Amino acid sequence: MSAGLRSGQVAEAAGVNLQTLRYYERRGLLAEPERSPGGHRLYGEEAVTALRVIKAAQRLGFTLEEVAELLEAGRHRHGRPVPGLQQRARDKLTEVDEKIADLTTIRATLTAALEAGCDNLTTCSASPCCPIPFTGLAEESRHAGPCC
């Protein structure tokens, strides 16, 4: 390869830092680049695309391990659709929906704690009107009295 992009150029074009580029290389997410006669890494444009794909997949909630599996499967399919990608996307969507449900519950509980005037976790846990879900032990130790 007589021409190529150096590490800094690839990182900048893909919107990542050099440490991320090298980390992905070590993890095998990026092919090891060729070297210039002076020993500099020289990447092809496909490295920029690969980095963008990795970052997009991470933003969609895929772990680096999952991204590596998808990339590896794609390398063996030569551009054809990867069997299981649809299922992996469905599984990830289910995971995201579960997280949204959990976050919705957390938000509602925090809102209730604010509305109840909770200002001290220990005091609140002993109050019968505390909206924060403590364990059964906390339920047993609650006594009647004003809210937090």
Image (tube, rainbow, N blue to C red):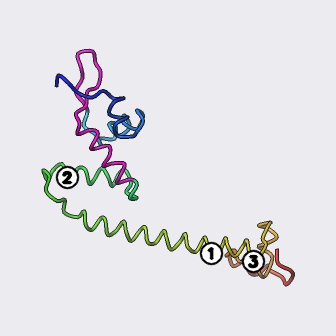
Q: Is residue 36 left or right of residue 66?
A: left
> Comparing marks 2 and 1, which lies closer to the viewer?
1
Image height check: is 11 above or below 76? above
Residue in view at x 34 percent, y 54 percent:
57
Cα–Cα gap, marks 2 and 3: 52 Å
Q: Is residue 54 above or below residue 18?
A: below
Residue 47 horizontal/vertical position (percent): 26, 38
Q: Which disc number belongs to residue 124? A: none
Q: Residue furthest front?
A: 13
| Image quadrant in which you'd find residue 111 | bottom right
Residue range of the region highlighted in magenta in the rendering:
33-58
Q: Give the Cα distance between marks 2 and 1.
A: 42 Å
* Amino acid at the residue labelled 1: Ala
Residue denoted by label 3: 130
Q: How far across and how far down the image is residue 73, in percent?
A: 21, 53
Tell me where residue 124 sits by quadrant: bottom right
Magenta span contains residue 61:
no
> Which quadrant: the C terminus?
bottom right
Q: Which mark is residue 74?
A: 2
| Residue for point 40% across, 55% down | 59
| Three-letter amino acid code of the residue under disc 2 | Gly
Asked if residue 33 is positioned above or below residue 67 in the image, the reply reads: above
Numbered tag placed on residue 108 in the rendering: 1
